[in-house]
Image (spheres, rainbow, N blue to C red):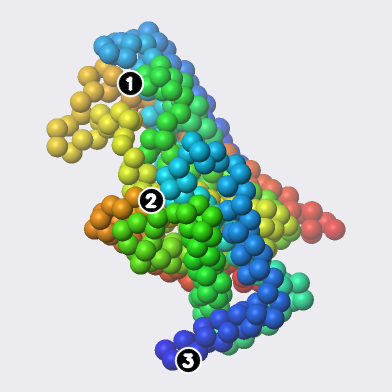
């Protein structure tokens, strides 16, 4: 068990180190989040539409689009110079590789989710409502479910000649539950509804994340085998 | 699989497809001239006899596709993959029928072509999952890889369907409630309508099975052709 965990840790560490040295994905996702906030500001007539009312949806859509931008390139660098073969030939089981890569993606995406929340709060003067802690929890579970699903399908799409173009077609239909529960919870908290109203959403987000993680861990080996 | 068994499959498939098509013509005749007109919805309700069996067939096809996909990843038998792709193609056709007949009826009954009603959303997403299935399948250089990728899409899709179903139920339902499978009270549909619905269900299922077997045989022939071309080269 501890061997398994350390194998996961090595993969996470390798991916984060790679990201720390190139800073490609985190910068792209972060810039995307901030610039989306700017574009939203000009695409909405804030005199007629109260940002507070639509912010929950915008936050989650920014998270999904920005997340795809980064997660879609999970396997890009390694595929370029054949390093993925090395990772797959290592003694680490395939599900450990998947879990490691998913956790590394989560470590990148969750700060971006917080950044999105922060940027929208700053740009639109949002009121974070009854429970900012619950808001952060919803974003964390949503990010986890998102990376669990999209890391698996990033492996699929990077094995096709369509590449990242294919990724939204594969993951958007499957992300509907996450967006419904995530945006639903965020919206309710931001209008100041009691926290008890969103515990169901939070549980569903957690269940979605767990099931997609388990499915990804089981199915990843079939995607990367050769 | 040998050529002779493929030929047998093709014959059976053709036979079933013809029976299914004839059955559907009979269903159309019954729906237009025989069955009684529904009191509140009038003539437009008759599309129900096409829409509901198409929906049923779509879900059956999707289940079959996911099941054979999972078994393919496990056993790696070519025939399972052939069954999965044949089911997926049938599901896409019947799903398209369902998604076109539904809005036509909805325009008259609800006053709108589209609404974010749970069942509509679910079936639209199901259609797109099938689309992803085919796109993944056809965009790999190595066909074996495409088969594995497609199987993964079908399995994750099947796991996600319950989530999608529960989550879209969050919105209030406009869709007519079930009128046949009601564990508490039994079918609520009047006799002749129920007879026609079940006839139509049978015709659609037979047609689907016919198309399924034809498609399955076609995949087998393609593979055989591949093997012979390689042997000749």
Q: State the SS at label 3.
A: helix
Q: Residues within 10 Å of mark 1 (few under 14, many from 20)?
A: some
Estimate the x, y position of residue B49 in percent, counting from the top left.
Answer: 38, 22
Query: Which class describes the residues within 10 Å of circle 2: few (<14), some (14-19), or many (20+)?
Result: many
Name the residue beneath numbered marker 1: B196
* Front residue of this view, candidates B168 and A115: A115
Image mark for residue B167 = none
Residue to which mark 3 is pinned: A3
Q: Chain of mark 3?
A: A
Mark 1 or 2: in front is: 2
Say which residue label 2 marks.
A187
Please tell me which residue lies in front, B111 or B92.
B111
Does A166 appear above or below A29? above
Please name which of the two marks, 2 or 3, marks the residue nearer to the observer. Answer: 2
Say if A77 sits above or below A186 in the image.
below
Identify the image quadrant of the C terminus of chain A.
bottom right
| Residue B229: % across, % down | 79, 54
User: CB atoms at circles 2 and 3 under 8 Å apart?
Assistant: no
Spatial CA span between label 3 and label 1: 62 Å
């Amino acid at each position: 068990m501890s061997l398994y965990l350390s194998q996961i840790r090595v993969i996470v560490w390798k991916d984060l180190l790679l990201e720390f040295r190139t800073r490609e994905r985190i910068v792209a996702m972060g810039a995307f989040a901030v610039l989306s906030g700017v574009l939203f500001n000009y695409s909405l007539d804030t005199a007629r539409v109260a940002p507070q009312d639509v912010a929950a949806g915008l936050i989650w859509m920014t998270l999904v689009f920005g997340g795809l931008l980064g997660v879609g390139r999970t396997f890009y660098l390694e595929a370029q110079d054949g390093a993925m073969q090395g990772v797959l030939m290592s003694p680490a089981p395939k599900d450990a590789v998947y879990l490691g890569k998913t956790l590394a993606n989560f470590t990148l995406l969750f700060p971006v989710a917080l950044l999105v929340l922060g940027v929208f709060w700053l740009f639109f003067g949002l009121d974070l409502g009854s429970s900012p802690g619950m808001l952060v929890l919803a974003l964390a579970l949503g990010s986890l479910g998102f990376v669990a699903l999209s890391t698996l399908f990033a492996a699929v799409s990077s094995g096709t000649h369509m590449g990242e173009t294919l990724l939204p077609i594969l993951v958007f239909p499957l992300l509907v539950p996450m967006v419904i529960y995530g945006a639903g919870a965020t919206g309710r908290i931001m209008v100041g509804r009691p926290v008890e109203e969103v515990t169901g959403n939070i549980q569903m987000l957690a269940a979605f994340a767990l099931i997609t993680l388990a499915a990804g861990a089981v199915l990843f080996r079939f995607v990367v085998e050769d | 699989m040998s050529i002779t068994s493929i030929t047998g499959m093709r014959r059976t498939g053709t036979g079933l497809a013809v029976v299914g098509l004839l059955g559907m013509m009979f269903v159309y005749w019954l729906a237009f001239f025989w069955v009684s007109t529904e009191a509140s919805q009038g003539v437009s309700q008759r599309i129900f006899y096409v829409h509901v069996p198409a929906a049923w067939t779509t879900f059956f096809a999707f289940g079959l596709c996911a099941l054979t996909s999972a078994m393919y990843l496990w056993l790696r038998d070519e025939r399972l993959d052939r069954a999965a792709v044949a089911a997926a193609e049938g599901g896409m056709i019947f799903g398209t029928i369902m998604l076109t007949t539904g809005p036509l009826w909805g325009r008259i009954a609800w006053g709108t072509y589209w609404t974010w009603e749970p069942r509509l959303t679910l079936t639209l997403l199901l259609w797109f999952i099938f689309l992803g299935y085919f796109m993944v399948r056809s965009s790999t250089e190595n066909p074996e890889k495409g088969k594995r990728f497609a199987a993964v899409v079908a399995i994750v899709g099947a796991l996600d369907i319950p989530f999608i179903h529960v989550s879209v139920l969050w919105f209030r339902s406009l869709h007519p409630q079930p009128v046949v499978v009601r564990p508490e009270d039994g079918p609520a549909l009047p006799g002749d309508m129920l007879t026609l619905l079940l006839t139509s269900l049978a015709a659609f299922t037979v047609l689907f099975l016919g198309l399924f077997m034809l498609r399955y045989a076609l995949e087998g022939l393609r593979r055989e052709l591949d093997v012979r071309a390689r042997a000749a080269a």
